Amino acid sequence: MLVAGDIGGTKTDLAIFSNEAGPHAPLAEAKVHSADYPSLQAIVKEFLAKSQKPVDRACFAVAGPVIGGRVKTTNLPWLIEENSLARELNLNLKAVQLINDLEAIARAVPILRPSDVCTLNAGAPVPEGTIAVIAPGTGLGESFLTWDGARYQAHSSEGGHSDFAPTDATQVRLLEYMFKKFDHVSFEHVCSGIGIPNIYGFLRDAERIPETPEVAALVASAADPSFVIINQAVSPENTSKLCTATIDMFVSILAAEAGNLAVKFLATGGVYVAGGVATHILQIIRQPAFMERFKRKGRFADLLGRIPMHVVVTPAGLVGAAACGLENSGLS
């Protein structure tokens, strides 16, 4: 059996899989807050002790660039190595694999079920066309898939750390505001869980959008302000114009960057939006403004209108890690 995990800056999902059940049917699973633990080893050992299921392989999707079997997590103070993991878990050295979390999501795309996605634009998919993936979670991840003649191959990237490109006058002012805080402003700084409070601060401090005292107090005291801002924006009882404006700007930036991926990769096979932030604000992403901003690429607007757009509503990183681990073990 395989233990697989999706290791994010905020939460870690773990599960045990078998060949018979496949990557969509975990035999045991757990979700924990990543920062509550000193290492991935500690999380996995605790999970295996509780599950009491024998495993002989492991595959973990990690937020960060995996190079030579090791990764320094982007939004956690962890250095993870395949060899040390294998020793700690009493597994064969070749039985443990680390992959980038966005590569894992990309690996899941070809095996997603209809219930795993919400389609924003059916479009006109080109068979075997390139597929792009963008995933705002704690950070911003990007990846893509290409057809190799027999199947789709997933490719990781660190595209979320590319330079933020404003698309309107307000976003230009956002960039200027961010330059006072950072010498490099990436899309992750304004299009992720850690980016949402940056937009909120800009709209409050520079654009002078007022906040209700009650919400201001919640945001100021929250361990994760983005959680408060999102919940306020999607709540039917929302009274915060600032939270609403923050998520509206976030969605506009996300749509524009999704469009950037579509033209960079010529993603005629479709664009998939994944990540925890996207699922929490799905009701806003489903509004027409998202696709309108996605298609705003001048002479290529018609092409982008034909590109399918889907939001992934299942834990795709875990599914992709499981699929990778089962495949590489020769079980699937």
Image: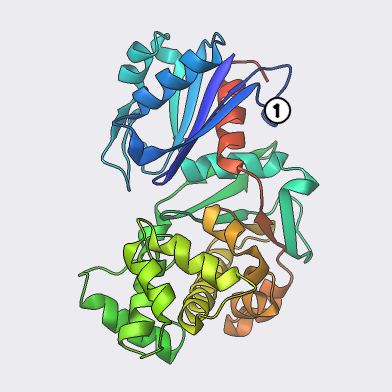
Q: Is residue 185 left or right of residue 322?
A: left
- Residue 156, placed above or below residue 278: above
Q: Residue 274 in the image: state x and y as whole percent.
A: 58, 54
Location of residue 33 by image quarter: top left
Q: Is residue 296 above or below residue 276?
A: below
Q: Residue 77 sits in which quadrant?
A: top left
- What amino acid type is highlighted by mark number 1? Ala
Coordinates of residue 257 in the picture (x, y in percent): 50, 69
* Outermost front residue: 214
Task: Choose between 201 and 78: the one closer to the eye.
Answer: 201
In the image, 153 versus 282, the foreground residue is 282
In the rendered view of the protein, which quadrant contains the C terminus? top right
- Could you tell whether 244 is left or right of 161 in the image? right
- The reply to whether residue 192 is in sight is no
Residue 208 locus on image (x, y percent): 36, 91
Spot occupied by residue 253 in the image (x, y as percentages of width and height): 49, 74
**Residue positioned 63% across, 54% down in the render:** 130
- At a point 56% along the width and 24% down the height, the residue shown is 325
At x 66% / y 51%, what residue is drawn? Answer: 313
Please name the residue that numbered disc 1 is placed on: 25
Q: Secondary structure at mark 1?
A: loop
Q: Bin the neighbour count of mark 1 within 10 Å (Cα to Cα): few under 14, some 14-19, many 20 and up.
A: some
